[in-house]
Image (spheres, rainbow, N blue to C red):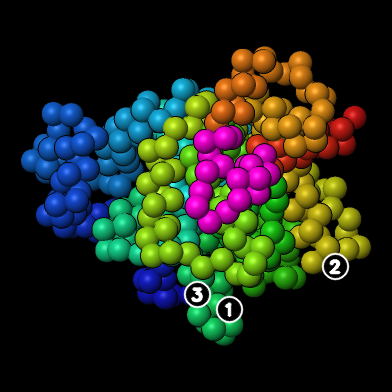
């Protein structure tokens, strides 16, 4: 595809970012964010710094990292990052991660790169993050690729073809790594799994060389683990209301989820970079058709994601409460159990869903990773 074909989905380039930031500086909401988040640093300070920035990467490393330092220090009890040693300096990677939070999941990967002085990645992000001009500008300035989800079946196909072409262009020609969630939308019930359609999309146009293309992409699984999910209450409610028909989001709901995900308390947070799949692709049986090969590769991705979970007392408590036993009682204290039960009680209160249903859905969010982790570990033995 000609590069002009990507105009409506691509992020800003190094030749464009300054003009976009100067526009942002005129927005009162951006000015307020600076004042609230960065003490003794305002628009004029940023304008002065902008004069010396030559690339988006420079802004990310200096400016974005300062924002993340503030958010993470205020909303977590520690961020634990591991697996950077699995990446080689000169290679690009197709990162596929479990998806629990709209913006923080990919932001944690960039934060890890900031700390390790590595090149950041592009981020494939749903068009719900581009709903206002302000959000759209911020997204494009942070190397985000717009994933268009709406439209007719024909429009969706064209959009997916364009997205696939841009991801492949990023990896193979522009030499930019890409992050994408393992499925469309966040995990609502705690059951992380890679959708076969995702792999089919990112490899579009390469049916005759499927495994060769996947090997070339350097697909690398990522696992993010939150002690507390900031949006667990919203997810539990959505799950309950979805039982009676398709869930219809209220105006501004995505923005509220973004805000809650950033500012809500998360306890301890862990991000683990897995091993690139290239070494495991020899396990894929050659006699399978392409769909079955993609299914097999999805399972390889999921297995790594599950094995790399960091499980907290909350996960084991939820599992025991859900199954009404004490299978994992040695993984937590009575004090931790009492604290989590009080948390469940608080999060289960909402006007349009019974408390019992909310509690059951919340337990799923925290208990399901235990089952997936134990299954992955048992398959190793």
Q: Residue 150: which disc? A: 3
Which residue sits furthest left? 44
Q: Quick one: label 1 or label 2, which is nearer the N terminus?
A: 1
Residue 282: x %, y % from top left: 83, 48
Determine whether the residue tagged by mark 3 lies in a helix, strand or loop.
loop
User: What distance separates the C-alpha of mark 1 from that of mark 2?
Assistant: 22 Å
Circle 1 residues within 10 Å: few <14, some 14–19, many ≥20: some
> Compared with residue 55, is residue 166 higher up or lower down, i.e. above or below?
below
Which quadrant holds residue 374? top right
Report if residue 24 lies within the magenta region: no
Q: Quick one: label 1 or label 3, which is nearer the N terminus?
A: 3
Report the span colored magenta. 344-363
Which quadrant holds residue 323? top right
Q: Is residue 189 left or right of residue 170?
A: right
Residue 210: x %, y % from top left: 73, 63
Residue 144: x %, y % from top left: 41, 55
User: What distance separates the C-alpha of mark 3 from that of mark 2?
Assistant: 30 Å
Circle 2 residues within 10 Å: few <14, some 14–19, many ≥20: few
State which mark lies toward you, 1 or 3: 3
Determine whether the residue tagged by mark 1 lies in a helix, strand or loop.
helix
> Compared with residue 341, is residue 191 higher up or lower down, i.e. above or below?
below
What residue would you read off at disc 1? 157
What residue would you read off at disc 2? 289
Report if residue 348 lies within the magenta region: yes
The residue at the point 60 percent across, 27 percent down is 340
- Residue 23 visible from this viewpoint: yes
State which mark lies toward you, 3 or 2: 3
Q: Quick one: label 3 or label 2, which is nearer the N terminus?
A: 3
> Compared with residue 301, is residue 286 higher up or lower down, i.e. above or below?
below
Q: Is residue 31 left or right of residue 83?
A: left
Which quadrant holds residue 260? top left
The residue at the point 69 percent across, 59 percent down is 195
């Amino acid at each position: 595809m000609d590069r002009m074909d990507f105009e409506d989905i691509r992020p800003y380039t190094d030749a464009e970012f300054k003009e976009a930031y100067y526009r942002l500086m005129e927005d009162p909401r951006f000015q307020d964010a600076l004042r609230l988040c960065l003490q003794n640093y305002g628009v004029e300070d940023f304008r002065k710094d902008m004069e010396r920035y030559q690339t988006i990467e420079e802004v990310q490393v200096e400016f974005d990292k300062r924002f993340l330092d503030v958010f993470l220090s205020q909303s977590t009890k520690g961020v634990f990052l591991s697996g950077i040693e699995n990446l080689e300096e000169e290679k690009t990677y197709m990162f596929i991660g479990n998806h629990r939070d709209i913006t923080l999941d990919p932001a944690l990967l960039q934060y890890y790169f900031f700390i390790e002085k590595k090149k950041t990645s592009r981020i494939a992000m749903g068009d719900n993050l581009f709903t206002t001009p302000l959000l759209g500008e911020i997204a494009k300035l942070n190397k985000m690729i717009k994933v268009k989800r709406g439209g007719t079946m024909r429009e969706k196909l064209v959009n997916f073809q364009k997205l696939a072409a841009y991801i492949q262009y990023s990896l193979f020609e522009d030499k930019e790594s890409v992050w994408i969630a393992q499925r469309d939308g966040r995990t609502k019930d705690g059951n992380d799994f890679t959708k076969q359609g995702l792999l089919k999309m990112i490899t579009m146009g390469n049916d005759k060389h499927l495994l060769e293309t996947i090997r070339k992409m350097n697909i690398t699984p990522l696992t993010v683990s939150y002690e507390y999910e900031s949006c667990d209450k919203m997810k539990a409610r959505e799950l309950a209301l979805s039982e009676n028909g398709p869930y219809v989001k209220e105006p501004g709901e995505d923005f509220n989820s973004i805000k809650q995900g950033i500012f809500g308390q998360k306890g301890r947070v862990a991000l683990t970079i897995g091993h690139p799949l290239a070494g495991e692709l020899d396990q894929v049986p050659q006699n399978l058709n392409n769909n079955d090969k993609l299914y097999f590769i999805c399972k390889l991705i999921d297995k790594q994601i599950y094995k790399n979970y960091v499980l907290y007392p909350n996960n084991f408590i939820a599992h025991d409460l859900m199954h009404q036993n004490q299978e994992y009682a040695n993984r937590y204290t009575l004090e931790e159990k009492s604290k989590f039960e009080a948390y469940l009680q608080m999060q289960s209160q909402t006007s349009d869903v019974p408390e019992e249903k909310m509690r059951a859905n919340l337990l799923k969010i925290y208990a399901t990773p235990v089952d997936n982790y134990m299954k992955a570990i048992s398959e190793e033995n």
